[in-house]
Image (spheres, grey):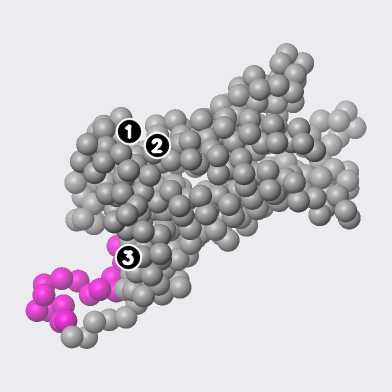
Amino acid sequence: MGELRDWRPFVYGGMASIMAEFGTFPIDTTKTRLQIQGQKIDRSHAELRYRGMVDAFVKISRQEGVKALYSGIWPAVLRQATYGTIKFGTYYTLKKVATDRGLLLDKAGNESVWCNAACATMAGAISSAIANPTDVLKVRMQVHGKGTSDVGLMRCFREIYIHEGVRGLWRGVGPTAQRAAVIAAVELPVYDFCKLHLMETFGDQVANHFISSFIASLGSAVASTPIDVIRTRLMNQRHVHQLQHSISPATTGTSPPHRLFYTGSVDCAVQTVRNEGFRALYKGFIPTWVRMGPWNIIFFITYEQLKQFY
């Protein structure tokens, strides 16, 4: 039981996640902006302001300042401190439990792909659901931009709580958990698989960790981008839970303040494809992959180096 209470995978996973987040966050901001734009159903985001990742990076820097690329960094760090810690710690703990019970390794010592994926899926879904409020704060701050001083963490939290209630902090929790489960189910087993098979060539060295993490990032980007687009759009939409009776929608010519553009994940996916085409589900794919590559490389190399202290 003492081994199951080992705190090191949790702490090292959280530390490595935070390091990776700082190194790749501007790319994540461009991804969020690309995923939000072009929504014909939402006039505030109907305009196609950016042609791609590089164009978004340049325009945000010029129009809003370089600081805007780090809008939402603190909730992102807070997210990694919770999500990253729980995800990777739980994953490696579940793998140890499965190994001790003879479920993970076969007689030849090879890991079961399905058992490995199941451990990763559970870890990803649980951790992302717990950390969802920090993800909502990050997305809202990234979309607003203009630097973290204009829309601080506490102000953003307060506005969501006042106008949308506690439920507003768990907006998009369904696709968030699904995305995290998909990423974990692809990324972690692929990394472990590649690392194991590259051991004879590179050994347990940085070169092995670099190649394995880069391969894992491609698979997770392809599998998770459609869910990520849906998740981002659901998190960004606002829902006022208290009707302002002093303002009549009939006199203002606007829709009631409690109206949502998307009622859920399926509705968001259907309306996105119907209004913008299937390719809209892969908006932000390039920055997603470009970010996941360095993110995984920084994370796994940092994690493997921290493991040397075991």
Residue 103 lies within the magenta run: no
**Residue 269 drawn in magenta:** yes
In primary-sequence order, the first of circles 1 and 3 is 1
Tell whether label 1 touches label 2 (CB within 8 Å).
Answer: yes
Number of other residues with Cα within 10 Å of mark 1, as a class: few under 14, some 14 to 19, many 20 or more = many
Sequence-wise, the earlier of marks 2 and 1 is: 2
Q: Which residues are magenta?
A: 247-271
Q: Secondary structure under badge 3?
A: loop
Q: Position of residue 52 (x, y in %)?
A: 29, 33
Q: Nearer the viewer, residue 103 or 244?
A: 244
Q: Please tell me whether residue 128 is drawn above or below residue 242 in the rendered image.
A: above
- The residue wearing badge 2 is 27
For the view shown, which residue lies furthest in the bottom direction?
245
In which image quadrant can residue 193 be found? top right
The residue singled out by tag 1 in the image is 53
* Between marks 2 and 1 in the image, the one whose residue lies nearer the viewer: 2
Residue 196, image x and y in percent?
74, 25
Which residue is labeled 3 in the image?
238
Residue type highlighted by circle 1: Met
Residue 79 coordinates in the image, percent (x, y): 53, 53
